[in-house]
Image: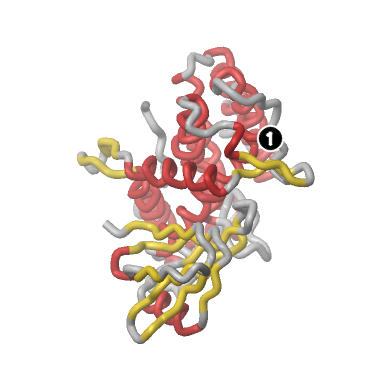
Amino acid sequence: MKQPLIIFKSGTIKREQNTIFFIEYEGRKHVIPVEAISEIEIFGEVTLNKRALEFFSKAKIPIHFYNYYGYYVGTYYPREHLNSGYVILKQAEHHLDPDLRLFLAKMFVYGAYRNIRQNLKNYDRDKSVEEIDAFADKIEDTKNIQELMAIEGNIRETYYKNFNNILKQFNFNKRQKRPPDNEINALISFGNTLLYTKVLSEIYFTHLDPRIGYLHQTNNRSFTLNLDIAEIFKPIIVDRVIFSLVNKKVINKKHFEIEAGTCFLNEEGKRIFVKAFEERLKNTIKHRKLNRKVSLQRLIRLECYKLIKHLIEDEVYEPFITRW
C-alpha cells in the first residue's frame, strides 16, 4: 500500500532525469520513492520546479502545503485522471436541486452526530448524549441548510463542552478557530486540516469532483466536498487522536508556542501529531457489508464510492456510523 510522504525540513525538490530528490538546505540528499507514495504533505520551506510538478502529475500524486503555523495553504491537485462527465453532471444536479442537496447535507450532519454521540458514550457522558439527541431529533424536519448548520453547531458546542471532562490536561472553554487561542483549539484545528487534505486525496482517486459540496457552500473556495465528508470522520479520527495524545501526555505544554494570540504546535508537536494521525488511519475495523477488515483510510474512500452510488441512483447514501 502506498504511503504519504511528509516533509518537515526545508529544502528543494528537484528532478534529475527520471528521479526525484529532496535536497535539504544543509545538503543532505534523499531520493523520493515516487512509486511508493500516495501524496506529499509539505510543512517545511520547500521549493520545487515545473519539471518536478510534471513528474508528480504523471504519477498522480497530490501535494498539500502548510505554512509555519501548520495551517493549510493549498494543494497542487494534478489533472483529474478519473473524469466522468456523468458523475459530475449528477453531482451538480444534486447540488442545484434544494431537496436533493438538503438530503445529502442532512446525512453528513447525521453521520457526524452519531459518531460524536459514540465518543460521548465511550466517556460516560450520558447527560450530554441526551442533549445532543434532542438537537439531532430536529435534523429530519430541517427545511434548509442554514437551519441544519445551526443544529450541527449546537451539537458540536455541547460536545466540546465535555472536553474538559474527557481530557486530563489543558483547560478548554470553547471552540475558537481563527485563531486557535489555546492548546486544544490548536490541536483540533491542526487535526481537522490534516483530515481535510486526506479526504481530498481520497476523492482524487474517485470520479467525484471535490469542488461540488452539499453541506458546505460551493462558491469561490476551491474544494468543499472534502469538508462535507470529513465531518463524519472528525470524531473517530481527529478527536480520538487528540484524546489519546493528551491523556497519555505524549503531547504537553512544551509542544506549543503562542505568537500574537495564536496558539500552534511547534515542529516537534506537529511531528508527533502527524505520526499518530497516520497510525490512526491504518487501524482496521471489520466492515459489516464487505465482511472483511478495512483501514480507516480505506473507509474514507468507501464513503466516496457510496456517495457516487447515491448520485447515480444506484443506492441511497447512508453515512458511516461507528459502533465502538
Name the residue rendered at 56%, 34% in the picture: 140
The quarter of the displayed image where residue 21 is located: bottom left
**Foreground of the two, 28 or 31:** 28
The quarter of the displayed image where residue 174 is located: top right
- Asked if residue 219 lies left or right of residue 208, the reply is right
Q: Decide: few, some or many residues near mark 1? Use Cα within 10 Å; few <14, some 14-19, many ≥20.
A: many
Q: Is residue 248 visible?
A: yes
- Asked if residue 298 lies left or right of residue 45, the reply is left
Name the residue rendered at 42%, 41% in the picture: 276
Residue labelled with disc 1: 182
**Foreground of the two, 281 or 116:** 281
**Foreground of the two, 33 or 11:** 11
Extreme-left residue of the structure? 291
Name the residue rendered at 52%, 13% in the picture: 126
Q: Is residue 56 above or below residue 215?
A: below
Q: Amino acid at mark 1?
A: Asn
Name the residue rendered at 66%, 29% in the picture: 157
Quadrant, the C terminus: top left
